[in-house]
Image (cartoon, rainbow, N blue to C red):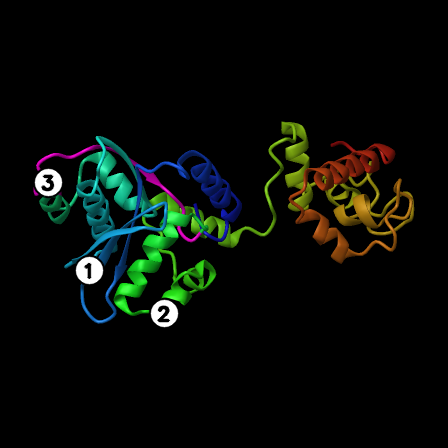
Amino acid sequence: MHPTYNAGRRQHRTRLLIRKYGSDPTTLYTDASPYPQRPAHVATVARIDNAFLTSATVCTASTTTAEEAAIALAMTQATSPSITIMSDSQAACRRFALGRVSALTLAILTQCPTLPHARIVWTPSHTALPGNEVAHATARALLHRAFPEEANNAASIANSLTPLSQTYADILYHYRATRRTYPPPHSSLSTADARIWRRLQTNTYYNHLHLHHISPANYPLNCPQCDEPNTTAHLVWTCPTNPPPPRSPTLEQWECVLQSCQLEDQEALISRARMAAAARALPE
């Protein structure tokens, strides 16, 4: 989940994690933070009650390997046969799921004679999950990268970090999201309505200007209601004969409506487009 384009989903997942694990004393939180001037990280483990359990310096330049080591360190701190470990590193969670951890992580695990049954759960970073914020703030404080009070400020931490895409899907989504101009159709729209919404956004909804190039004898170039060039924006938005007409319609308002993510706005514009097309005997 991208921190910018999926902020709502990240917050929703955090609320679910707090509801499920917020009062669980067997849940541990891990984090890793790099040293400023050397190829090493500090790995920390904390509990939900703001208790800092342990930390270790991990001699690796890879943040994912350090996050792995933090998870392994949490396993060695377990006091019950079954625990839950929260990590904000998707890559580290995937490596444990695939059984492909680094040699450094394996060395930490093999030093413990008895390992608990651990459930590793990914949590979005910097979304006010208490235990995760404690682990991250402690790592920053141990490295003297910030004062502890500043480290507790999740907003300042998030602004100081640049998230990196790890997988092909993440990289592809990043480029797709940065190039996106208009929002997708609302999930509650029918297939036909979603198609009309996309055609309105891409200026491919049937109007006299388009159809005149296909069949000049059947479709005039201008609007039959007001004799203005009948573009998509004019057909649906700016024509004064459309019911109900917006107050002082402008092209800027038209662009704003096309960028709306609300179901009510999308349904209203689709209904308006259908009525305008029907009044002029245009196909959908």
Q: Is residue 107 left or right of residue 5?
A: left
Q: Nearer the viewer, mark 1 or mark 3?
A: 3
- Residue labelled with disc 1: 61
Locate residue 239, reporting x and y percent.
86, 48
Q: Looking at the picture, which amino acid does disc 2 mark?
A: Phe
- Residue labelled with disc 2: 147
Residue sitting at x 23%, y 33%: 80
For marks 3 and 2, give the CA distance: 34 Å
What SS does tag 2 mark?
Answer: loop
- Residue labelled with disc 3: 112
Quadrant of image for the C terminus? top right
Residue sitting at x 18%, y 64%: 39
Q: Nearer the viewer, mark 1 or mark 2?
A: 2
Q: Looking at the picture, which amino acid does disc 3 mark?
A: Cys
- Give the extent of the magenta segment: 109-126
Mark 1 or mark 3: name the one nearer the start of the chain: 1
Work out whether residue 43 or residue 277 is closer to the camera in this orientation and state it: 43
